[in-house]
C-alpha cells in the first residue's frame, strides 16, 4: 500500500485500535494510572477523527474508500464505548441498543447509495434537501454531536476514576453531567439518522 497517499485512511483505521486500548484499560486495572491513560487515549482517538479529514482535504486524499473507512471507524469506536459503558453499569443498555440500531439502519441505506455513486458527505452526498444536508453534514450539527459524545465519554471515565471522590466536583454531580451529555449525544445520534431514512426512497426507485 502507498502509505504516503493513504495517510488519512491509515489514521482512520488506527483510531479504532487506540480506542480499543483505551477501553481495554478500563477492564485490565482499577488503578488511577489506567483510568487516566484511558481518559487521554479516548481524547486522542476522537481527535484523530478530525485529523484524518484534515489530511484528506489538505493532501487531496479524499475518496469513496476514505469515506467508508471514516464512517466505519466512527461506528466501531462509538458503539464500542456505548457497549462498554453499559456493561460496566455506567449507562443503561438502551444507549448501545439505540446506537447499534441507528448504525445498521443508516449504513445499510448508505451502502445502497454508495453502489449508485453517492457518498454520505461531500459533493456526492446522498442528501438532496437543504434540511437533510444541514442535519447530516453541517459543521454545527457534526461538531455539536461530536462535542456532546466525546465530553460524555471522557467525563464518564473521569467520574469513575478511583480518585474521583477527591475531586472538587463531587462524583454524583460529575456523573450526572456525564449522563446528561450522553442523553444529548444519543438524541443527536437519532436525529442525524432521520434525513438518511427520509430521503432513502429515491434509492429504490426503478
Image (spheres, rainbow, N blue to C red):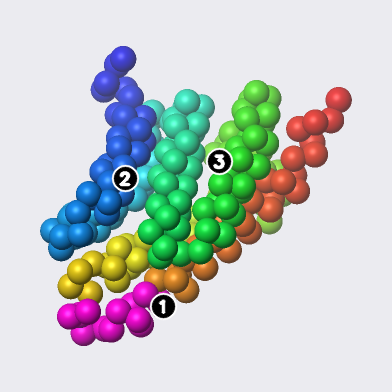
At horizontal 56% and vertical 47% (from top left) the residue drawn is: 100
Q: Where is residue 38 drawn, in percent x and y?
A: 24, 54
**Which is nearer the N-term, disc 2 or disc 1?**
2
What separation in Å lies between label 1 and label 3 (alpha carbons)?
34 Å
Q: Is residue 8 visible?
A: no
Quadrant location of residue 29? bottom left
- Which SS type dominates the magenta stretch? helix
Secondary structure, mark 1, is helix
Asked if residue 204 lies in the magenta stretch, the reply is no
Please state if 90 lies on the left or on the right of 68 as rendered.
Answer: left
Q: Where does residue 180 sit, x and y in percent of width and height? A: 47, 74
User: Which residue is at a point 29% across and 68% down the rendered structure image?
Assistant: 160
Q: CA distance from mark 2 to mark 3?
A: 24 Å
Confirm or deny contact between disc 2 and disc 1 (CB under 8 A): no
Residue 176, label in figure:
1
Q: Residues within 10 Å of mark 2 (few under 14, many from 20)?
A: many
Looking at the image, residue 33 lies above or below residue 109 = below
- Characterize the local packing of mark 1: few (<14), some (14-19) or many (20 or more) Cα atoms within 10 angstroms: some
**Residue designated by label 2:** 19
Taking the image as shown, residue 45 lies to the left or right of residue 132, namely left
Q: Nearer the viewer, residue 45 or 23?
A: 23
Query: What's the magenta region?
Result: 165-177
Find out whether the residues at labels 1 and 3 contact each other: C-beta distance under 8 Å. no
Location of the N terminus (image quadrant)? top left
Say the numbered circle drawn on residue 121: 3
**Mark 3 closeness class: few <14, some 14–19, many ≥20 residues within 10 Å:** some
Distance between the Cα atoms at labels 2 and 1?
Answer: 24 Å
Amino acid at each position: 500500500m502507498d502509505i504516503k497517499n493513504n495517510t488519512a485512511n491509515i489514521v482512520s483505521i488506527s483510531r479504532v485500535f487506540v480506542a480499543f486500548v483505551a477501553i481495554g484499560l478500563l477492564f485490565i486495572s482499577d488503578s488511577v494510572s489506567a483510568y487516566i491513560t484511558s481518559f487521554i487515549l479516548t481524547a486522542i482517538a476522537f481527535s484523530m477523527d478530525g485529523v484524518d479529514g484534515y489530511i484528506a482535504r489538505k493532501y487531496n486524499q479524499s475518496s469513496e474508500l476514505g469515506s467508508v473507512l471514516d464512517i466505519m471507524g466512527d461506528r466501531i469506536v462509538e458503539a464500542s464505548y456505548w457497549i462498554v459503558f453499559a456493561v460496566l453499569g455506567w449507562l443503561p443498555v438502551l444507549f448501545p441498543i439505540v446506537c447499534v440500531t441507528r448504525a445498521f439502519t443508516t449504513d445499510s441505506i448508505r451502502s445502497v447509495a454508495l453502489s449508485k455513486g453517492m457518498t454520505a458527505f461531500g459533493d456526492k452526498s446522498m442528501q438532496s434537501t437543504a434540511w437533510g444536508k444541514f442535519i447530516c453534514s453541517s459543521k454545527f450539527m457534526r461538531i455539536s454531536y461530536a462535542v456532546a459524545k466525546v465530553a460524555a465519554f471522557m467525563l464518564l471515565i473521569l467520574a469513575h476514576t478511583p480518585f474521583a471522590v477527591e475531586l472538587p466536583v463531587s462524583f454524583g454531580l460529575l456523573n450526572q453531567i456525564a449522563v446528561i451529555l450522553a442523553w444529548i449525544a444519543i438524541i443527536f445520534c437519532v436525529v442525524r439518522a432521520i434525513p438518511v431514512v427520509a430521503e432513502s426512497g429515491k434509492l429504490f426507485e426503478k
